[in-house]
Image: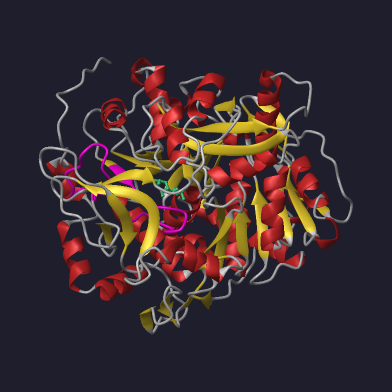
């Protein structure tokens, strides 16, 4: 198949055919504007409630929201059982594709129900009750999703920790949440190799000493590799879950029953446990998944390429799609395993119709070349999605041409771990999309771009650079975070203090309006970096670096990077006479230290050993200037610098 670019256009309206069959129409915006709370009440009716709610929103104790007050439901029942009861038990819920070629398994809703019930019974036997926390540290295997749903069924909170995180990152999360059980696997496949995972759990727990809250470690046999074992504490999943009963009656829980904790990076070194609850979260996950992805559960095959370790995996692999009775692909491995054709082969084999990924992966595919995609029949695709960082217009156009046959809508979805579900995104059957813009707030959601004083910015003019401002959410939304685990003050301070007077949530992102009033998100304006769509704070990496005995001081900045969006650049001052290592050896040691303390994904792209760091007179590191250096720009305003000569020294050191 050969294809050429059609003329790049400024905007792409949906085709008449797509618009005619779309779930979401212009009417949806009108309904939401007419009566926002009534609109959300109708969306909540998508779910099965054991007890109906009596009030849509209680905002009297802002910023602590209560949605769907008085309502009771079971989240797992909504994601699994009710589809079976509706006669769709034979529909495939998950086409699971393992990393090793030919390792695949399709699971129907009826089978998923049995499996979730077994796991819920097994967890109950291990003493897990409503309100308890369970850590899930697993690769993308079906049991990870089953474990999440089993927790939800019991009213216990899961805390999924990305399996690429180190033992010490896991330990900090177990400790903060006081998790009673950890679910993991013996190992995981990484680029064709079986590598151990369970030892990291042992390490994490061993480091907890006396205060260890972990009573059991439940281990899924994934790779069959040798696994260290602690008798009494450790249990094989196949020994306790497979033999458990498939009968389990779900209890109904309050709409505000905590559903999960998910740790994310903030502007300090300590990750925040973001708390999400049940009724509001599931309502918005389900609503957005239905309308933004235009899901037709009877015929679509949906694939979100995220990992369940991130919020995208929670909302758009587990809760959104399953609450809507979708059939989806879940893939365990990396895109180049065993070669660059893997994603395209999967799309072709399963007839994937909706594909949701991150811009960094689109850019990787671009690098590999369109011939790889064009070797496959991708004509089943009818909708594409993007999330995690701003998508550059060139990547957007390439994605539409090469994946979408120059015809499919692309939904660029802006949201955060904290928002729980998509907030700013097009409706694919309505919005004429401009490549690179997430367009406007979804029906029922309200977002604004404001200046320092909270004045809304004007839409951009046709010519010239538009001013940028702060992206705020000026009205509460159902899937909003309910707090930071154990730290209500930090919750208020982090999100609600910048525009406290107005009572707005500040997202940490900068944005500007385009010519037609559409929103262009520019990225973080705080000390949070976005590397391949992964959130990492400068402070976390700095604290890992200064944790090394040879480092006196460290400053970390995110510099723009063509393939990963941002890349981590570190500047370190070494302690005099600490070691005999050369600078090169030291840099290697430091990169390893960061991987060990946080994760290989947090390894700096570059580490510069410097004699000094640029500081203000009050001693604050001027990251803005370091970013200029890292990006090879002329230095910005240096007038507040304590010692203007410092850059000579830094440049000389590079
Ligand atoms: C960025 C991921 C531009 C943004 C769901 C946000 C985006 C942070 C987009 C949240 C997008 C996410 N366009 N920027 N479509 N989606 N971001 O918590 O900076 O991992 O604040 O949630 O990613 O990252 P998080």
- Magenta segment, principal secondary structure? loop
Q: Residue at x 36, y 35 (%)?
A: 636
Q: Residue at x 82, y 39 (%)?
A: 227
- From this viewpoint, which residue is outermost toward the right? 231
Q: Quadrant of the N terminus?
A: top left
Is there any visible trace of residue 163 in the rendered image? no
Tell me: 358 left or right of 28.
right
Tell me which corner region of the image, top left, top right, bottom left or bottom right, holds residue 103.
top right
User: Magenta stretch: residue 28 in it?
Assistant: no
- From this viewpoint, which residue is outermost toward the left? 462
Tell me which corner region of the image, top left, top right, bottom left or bottom right, holds residue 634.
top left
Magenta residue span: 411-439
Tell me: 441 left or right of 46.
left
Q: Residue 81 at what x, y percent from top left?
A: 51, 63
Q: Is residue 635 above or below residue 202?
A: above
**551 or 216, nearer to the observer:** 551
**46 or 83, nearer to the observer:** 46
Q: Residue at x 61, y 53 (%)?
A: 270
Q: Residue at x 65, y 29 (%)?
A: 591
Q: Quadrant of the C terminus?
A: top right
Q: Residue 17 at what x, y percent from top left?
A: 15, 42
**639 or 27, nearer to the observer:** 639
User: Magenta stretch: residue 412 in it?
Assistant: yes
**203 or 379, nearer to the observer:** 203
Q: Residue 397 at what x, y percent from top left?
A: 25, 29
Q: Residue 343 at what x, y percent from top left?
A: 45, 28
Q: Is residue 456 above or below residue 35?
A: above
Is there any visible trace of residue 11 in the rendered image? yes
Tell me which corner region of the image, top left, top right, bottom left or bottom right, holds residue 451.
bottom left
Q: How are the residues colored?
A: secondary structure
């Amino acid at each position: 198949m050969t294809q050429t670019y059609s003329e790049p256009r400024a905007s792409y309206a949906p085709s008449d055919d797509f618009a005619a069959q779309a779930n979401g129409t212009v009417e949806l915006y009108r309904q939401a504007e007419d009566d926002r709370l009534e609109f959300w009440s109708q969306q909540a009716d998508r779910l099965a409630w054991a007890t109906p709610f009596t009030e849509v929103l209680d905002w009297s104790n802002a910023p602590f929201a209560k949605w769907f007050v008085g309502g009771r439901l079971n989240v797992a029942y909504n994601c699994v059982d009710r589809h079976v009861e509706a006669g769709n038990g034979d529909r495939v819920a998950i086409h699971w594709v393992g990393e090793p070629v030919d390792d695949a398994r399709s699971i129907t809703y009826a089978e998923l129900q049995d499996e979730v019930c077994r796991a819920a019974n097994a967890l109950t036997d291990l003493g897990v009750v409503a309100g308890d926390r369970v850590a899930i540290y697993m690769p993308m295997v079906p049991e990870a999703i089953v474990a999440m749903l089993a927790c939800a069924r019991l009213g216990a909170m899961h805390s999924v920790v990305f399996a690429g995180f180190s033992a010490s990152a896991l330990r900090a999360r177990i400790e903060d949440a006081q998790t009673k059980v950890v679910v993991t696997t013996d190992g995981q496949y990484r680029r064709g190799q079986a590598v151990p995972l369970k030892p990291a759990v042992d390490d994490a727990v061993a480091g907890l000493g006396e205060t260890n809250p972990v009573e059991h470690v439940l281990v899924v046999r994934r790779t069959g590799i040798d696994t260290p074992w602690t008798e009494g504490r450790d249990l094989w999943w196949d020994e306790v879950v497979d033999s458990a009963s498939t009968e389990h009656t779900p209890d109904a829980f309050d709409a505000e029953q905590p559903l999960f904790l998910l740790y994310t990076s903030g502007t300090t070194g300590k990750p925040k446990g973001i708390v999400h609850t049940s009724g509001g979260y599931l309502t918005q996950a389900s609503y957005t998944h239905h309308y933004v992805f235009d899901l037709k559960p009877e015929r679509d095959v949906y694939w979100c390429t995220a990992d369940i370790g991130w919020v995208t995996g929670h909302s758009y692999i587990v809760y959104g799609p399953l609450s809507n009775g979708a059939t989806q692909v879940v893939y365990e491995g990396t895109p180049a395993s065993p070669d660059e054709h893997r994603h395209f082969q999967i799309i072709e084999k399963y007839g994937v119709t909706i594909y949701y990924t991150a811009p960094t992966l689109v850019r990787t595919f671009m690098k590999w070349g369109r011939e790889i995609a064009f070797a496959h029949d991708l004509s089943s695709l009818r909708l594409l999605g993007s999330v995690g960082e701003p998508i550059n217009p060139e990547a957007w156009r390439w994605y539409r041409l090469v994946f979408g046959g120059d015809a499919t809508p692309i939904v660029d979805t802006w949201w955060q771990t904290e928002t729980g579900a998509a907030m700013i995104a097009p409706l694919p059957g309505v919005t004429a999309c401009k490549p690179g813009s997430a367009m406007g707030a979804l029906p029922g959601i309200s977002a604004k771009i404001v200046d320092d004083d909270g004045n809304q910015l004007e839409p951009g003019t046709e010519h010239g650079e538009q001013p940028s401002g702060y992206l705020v959410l000026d009205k509460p939304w159902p899937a909003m975070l309910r707090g930071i685990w154990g730290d209500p003050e930090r919750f208020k301070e982090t999100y609600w203090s910048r525009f406290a007077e107005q009572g707005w949530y500040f997202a940490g992102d900068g944005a500007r309006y385009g010519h037609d009033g559409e929103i262009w998100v520019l990225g973080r304006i705080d000390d949070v970096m976005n590397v391949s769509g992964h959130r990492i704070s400068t402070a976390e990496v700095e604290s890992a670096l200064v944790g090394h005995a040879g480092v006196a001081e460290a400053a970390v900045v995110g510099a723009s990077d063509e393939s990963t969006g941002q890349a981590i650049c570190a500047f370190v001052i070494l302690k005099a006479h600490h070691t005999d290592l050369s600078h090169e050896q030291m840099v290697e040691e430091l990169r390893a230290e960061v991987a060990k303390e946080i994760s290989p994904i947090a390894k700096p792209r570059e580490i510069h050993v410097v004699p000094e760091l640029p500081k203000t007179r009050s001693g604050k590191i001027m990251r803005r200037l370091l970013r200029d250096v890292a990006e090879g720009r002329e230095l910005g305003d240096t007038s507040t610098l304590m010692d203007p000569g410092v850059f000579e020294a830094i440049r000389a050191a590079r």
